Amino acid sequence: MKNKVVIITGGSSGIGLALAQEFGLHGSKILITGRNKEHLERAVTDLRSKGIVIEGFVSDVGIEDDNQHMAREAIMKFGSIDILINNAGISMRALFEDVDLNVIKKVMDTNFYGALYATKYCLPEIIKNKGSIVGISSIAGYRGLPGRAGYSASKFALNGFLEVLRTEFLKRGVHVLTACPGFTSSNIRKNALTKDGTRQGQSPRVEEQMMSAEECARHIYRATLKRKARLVLTTQGKFAILLNKFFPSLADRMVYNVMAKERNAPIS
């Protein structure tokens, strides 16, 4: 990965920030994006202090033009694009019967359309360099989670999109990785949208008991290096996918019971 140019959307915190550090410490040149300029600048300063070659670019992946400008910025700063990591994402937590549909649209705009736009504008360089497209999906993209209609739908859509790309580029040397972390410690649950679009503000789960963002990033780095097609993390995540495939009715009940134990769960 030395001297490879890597774009990471949503790279100012959580898994995105950990990925920037992991790839950067292995010699990659990094461009991270984020909507919050202050958070982005803080992340860039911290990573530069560790000797990482990095630039920040303020953008919203849900806005198509921002993605076109992002790709141009990477080429202007580093001359190329080798790897795109579609990491930017938001979550939501509310029953579908209660949720404002604008909440689901906002989640889809970021998690699905954001990946679509970023990939479209980075694709010519990635094809030229026989590089990699990485999508940070979720176990929720294989197994629908109650209270996460918008999030699960966006990740199912992302998984399908990445599968299409992987097949279309099967004989053209472009690598496509679908990475599905299980529950990973990050700020995504604190920033999750509630039924009216306000932020949840507090994680309903015990973050300290989850896989760290840094460990997650190490797995994704190695999977990218080995040009793997799929990566599913955590024992719980792998079990959920297998259970859903072979015993879907049992999976319905077990997933319901697990999610009902969350703090202030919308189901009981």
Image (cartoon, grey):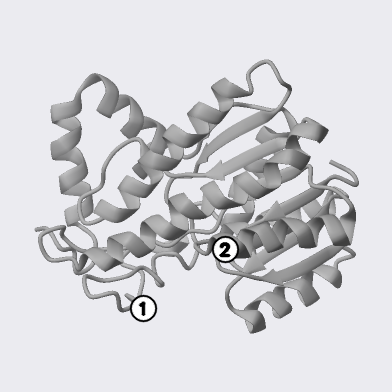
Q: Is residue 262 visible?
A: yes
Q: Which residue is at a point 68% across and 15% down the rendered structure image?
A: 171
Give the camera-side residue of 115 and 211: 115
Q: Residue at x 82, y 64 (%)?
A: 54
Residue at the far bottom: name it: 38
Relative horizontal placement of residue 159, taking residue 253 as reference (left or right) = right
Q: Residue 16 is drawn in which quadrant?
A: bottom right
Residue at image location 74% in from the left, 33% down from the top: 127
User: Which corner quadrant of the image does residue 7 belong to?
Assistant: bottom right
- For label 2, the SS is helix
Residue 52, percent from left and from top: 86, 62
Q: Locate residue 214 relative to residue 93 in the image: left or right.
A: right
Give the residue number, with chain letter if any, for mark 1: 201
Can you give x and y, in whole percent of width and height, for residue 140 in the image?
35, 44
Q: Would residue 10 be seen by someone viewing this image from the given angle?
A: no
Q: Amino acid at mark 1?
A: Gly
Return the x and y of residue 122 as percentages of the image width and height.
Answer: 69, 47
Question: What kind of residue is marked 2?
Answer: Gly
Question: What is the secondary structure assignment of the residue under circle 1?
Answer: loop
Q: Residues within 10 Å of mark 1 (few under 14, many from 20)?
A: some
Numbered label attached to residue 14: 2
Disc 2 packing (10 Å; few <14; some 14–19; many ≥20): many
The quadrant of the image that shows the C terminus is bottom left
- Whether 263 is drawn above or below 169: the answer is below
For marks 2 and 1, the one nearer the N-term is 2
- Nearer to the camera, 75 or 216: 75
Mark 2 to mark 1 CA distance (whole Å) = 15 Å
The percent coordinates of residue 245 (x first, y second) are 28, 23
- Is 199 placed above or below 169 here? below
The dot on residue 56 is none
Q: Residue furthest top?
A: 171
